[in-house]
Amino acid sequence: MTVHIASTVHVGRHGDASDGAFAEAVGGRLSRVDGPAKITGAAKYAVEQQLEGLAYAVLVESTIASGKVRAIDTKAAEAAPGVLQVLTPDTIISLRTAADWFGTPPPDKPYCPLARDITFSGQHVAAVVAETFEQAVAAAALVKVSYDETPAIVDLSDVKAGDGIPIDAMTKEWGDAQGAFASAPVRICAAYNTPREYQAPIEPHGLIARWEGDKLTVWEPSQWLDGMARTYAEWFGVPFENVRLVSPYIGGGFGSKALALSHGAVAACAARMLGRPVRLVMTRPQTFTGYGGRAATRQTVTIGADAQGKIQSIVHRGINETSMDGMWVEPLGSVISIMYATPNFSSRQNVVRVNSVVPGAMRAPGENPSAFGIESAIDELAYEVGIDPLEIRLRNYAEQDPHAKKAWSTRQLREAFAAGAERFGWARRSPEPRSIRDGNQLIGWGVAAGTYPVRRAYGEAIVRILADGSVEVESSSIDMGQGTYTILAQTAAETVGVRADDVVVKLGDSRFPRAGVTGGSRLAGVMTGAVYKAATSALDQLIGLAISDPRSPFYALQANTLVVANGRIASPRGDGPDVSIAELLKSVGRDHIEATGDTMPANSTPEDRYKNYTTIAMSVPHTEGDYSRHSWCAHFIEVRVDEDFGTVRVSRVVSALDSGRLYNPKLAESQWKGGIIMGIGQALLEEGIVDRRHGRVVNNNLADYLVPTNADIPDIEVISVGIPDPHSSVLGGKGVGELAIVGVAPAIANAVFHATGKRIRDLPITLEKLI
Amino acid sequence: MTKTTIPVHLDINGHHHDLQLEPRVTLLDALRDRLGLTGTKKGCDHGQCGACTVHIDGERVLACLTLAAQVEGRTVTTIEGLAREGEMHPVQAAFLEHDAFQCGYCTPGQIMSAVACIREGHAGSDDEIREYMAGNLCRCGAYPHIVAAIRQAALEVAS
């Protein structure tokens, strides 16, 4: 048994830079350790591997939204130069249906990633494989597909769409919401809409698939190596261990790269049939239909309140679109059910089938549109009763989770309101709409809150202390820009007692110890915990050897504790030897020390572990036990609206955020600002536009689907108001990545109302809605 | 393969390359697929995102809208050729210091654009930087940090 006091993880009072004694410790502002590779072009992303014999695949997509493929004429394509193979539903090998991400046993029927029955425009119907990319592109244009077309339901506003399917699991009700609303002195009711939005990572989806016998290697940008490996294994009926996913860097995901998708199946089939590695990368237009963006949503929010603005009842009804053959539920009741105290509440949700690709996860699915509803509605209530929009939020502050009826683990939202308001200068705001002007620009100030639950899962990691005294960390988790490489280096460095420079973190290979999905802002909390445990265990072994091995220079000291810092081992009293880790390992004849750590419950079976890492079935509810766990934020935003043209510019943003303890404030601030910027895009620019004749997304490219550019974004100030939350993660952090987008769009809509007197309830806020 | 290729001679980062290419091969695909210079990224292949920005004779150009055969006899610099003798360009160093990227995929294009933006004399103010960097999309939303990095690097380059 060894006892050591070396470098125990220091949990500071604040979630800011003051936590870490050095930039390299947890809480320090260490620059990205993967940064040098990214800024020099050395970082090889998944599809950039140079493989011998690589063939190139290009997809052919349906041009109708509903109907059947009558015939596919491949003759011209097959005769084109360099073509190796044309895959159609008739020629592609048959796969098995894989379980969904919950691990639900799939129906026992074949799966074909190329479609005969068309349920949306842009569905994959064929693929061409050729010796070069150019040849594949040219030949794909020669594939002629004929269809028997049937009428499509193009979107939620289609008269054929109907009311949809009630999702009972989404119902949240307490008290008598309808009765209390009917008798409330102040009543507001409004409808809020959000359009289809797209994740639009700058790296398009794609992969390289290579078979060696029954073993498949897939280089693919992935937010979930083990989940995707399971899907490939089940499709092809090979053992899980036979599939290796490699994803060293991910060029943005935002929710869209967590699942193995049909284009991946096509490429893996092509590689198997051809006996060669195959690369398939979606074109930018294909990324708008090859997987789903955020579903379009409709909400009605009714609030009954007293004359002082105290809420008595909230009634909420929501719908989101889903596809004809898939089920996506965007949980619209998530924020409205917890943000404010109310004695009476009712939220219900339907989903409506339309001819679209099945929608998917996009940064804060559910919380994002839910916050647009309630955070717009409470602003409307503030104006109805004549109370400051910030004051009405404080007046209805939820002192506990109103839905789960549990205490918050930590909720620094009041502090966020105070810090943001102070920095923004909110107290100087004149409440009257159209009361601030600069020439022909109307200026408005808006506020809104946001929240995101602390989703928790499990992860495992190996920490090795190597002969040269350096430390190696391995995990199949990933870094798509959140900073995983960096914060795991900081965690291992601080825990073992070495410099961060001496830690090498290896991620993005499914051969490494496993990790669940990187989504729901859970990875940092999960993986810092796993690395902390593995590193602690490795340090225990190191100090145990130093104390007990007769060859160790510390053996004669008869110590029961040693200190490891900056890669050197010494007695805490300063007496005795002072040697480097490398020297100690050499003296005891070891070339490395290795320890595995995980955050799984102690009695977990191998089956539990497999299920945990390859499905989301084992995620821990954020309301488990005595607490309700969430991140919180408050956005204060200034807009300038051109009175003649109706153009809206965001001119100032101050956001105060509670993500608990920050493992690296420099990187967390970047993620927060990124979320805010995506929120500005959502508020003012982003909208998938559907051609009503063909059910086709027509702005399926980066010139017509507008994401924010540098010129759209002002300087943004973010303030951390978090405190360590021991109920949320091993090291006290809460979610970072998704939080900051939540509440941005309503803050802007509220600012636009303040500027113009016009309440826009339908995103994005484009000029024609203001003039 | 049918005889549809032409010889193309490229000068990239100070190295000479002799390639046999179809005339329709873009500079971007030649760099990435033929020469293994994958630092230049493909985000849209339509000149909409800026991820493929390289320098041709010192000016910023979109490699996806440029045929490889068009740059014969001209000097091409990619992100891999920006550092000199192992010394990072001030823009690269400033990007790291200011955390002007997250996923890193748009980053080579941002950096190549930023170097040219400074050289063009378009880094005089934050608003000017924002305008002249608006052709390089960053979906992670690193824009404020990109502006800060360019502001700093512009001063260093000038001094």
Image: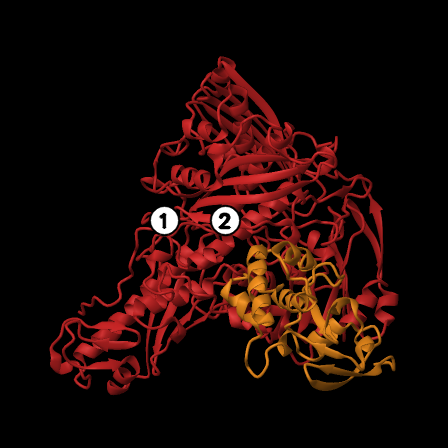
Q: Which chain is red?
A: A
In the image, A491: left or right of A738? left
- Asked whether the viewer can see residue B137, the reply is yes
- The residue that disc 1 covers is A728
Q: Quadrant of the N terminus of chain A?
A: bottom left
Q: Colour of chain B?
A: orange
In the image, A748: left or right of A120? left
- Asked whether the viewer can see residue A43, the reply is no
Subunit that carries the residue with mark 2: A
Q: Quadrant of the C terminus of chain A?
A: top right
Q: CA distance from mark 2 to mark 1?
A: 26 Å
**Cβ atoms under marks 2 and 1 closer than 8 Å:** no
Give coordinates of residue A481: x percent, y percent: 53, 61
Identity of the residue drawn at 16% across and 75% down: A574
Identity of the residue drawn at 44% across and 50% down: A735
Residue A158 or residue A691, whichever sits in front: A691
Please tell me which of labels 2 and 1 falls first in the chain.
2
Near mark 1 (Cα within 10 A), the count class, few <14, some 14-19 or many ≥20, is: many
Give coordinates of residue A227: x percent, y percent: 52, 59
Tell me the amino acid under the disc marked 1: Ser
In the image, A478: left or right of A595? right
* Residue A97 quadrant: bottom right
- The residue that disc 2 covers is A717
* Residue A126 quadrant: bottom right
Give coordinates of residue A49: x percent, y percent: 62, 75
SS of the residue at dot 2? strand
Identity of the residue drawn at 31% across and 57% down: A603
Tell me the amino acid under the disc marked 2: Glu
SS of the residue at dot 1? loop
Residue A121 or residue A580, whichever sits in front: A580
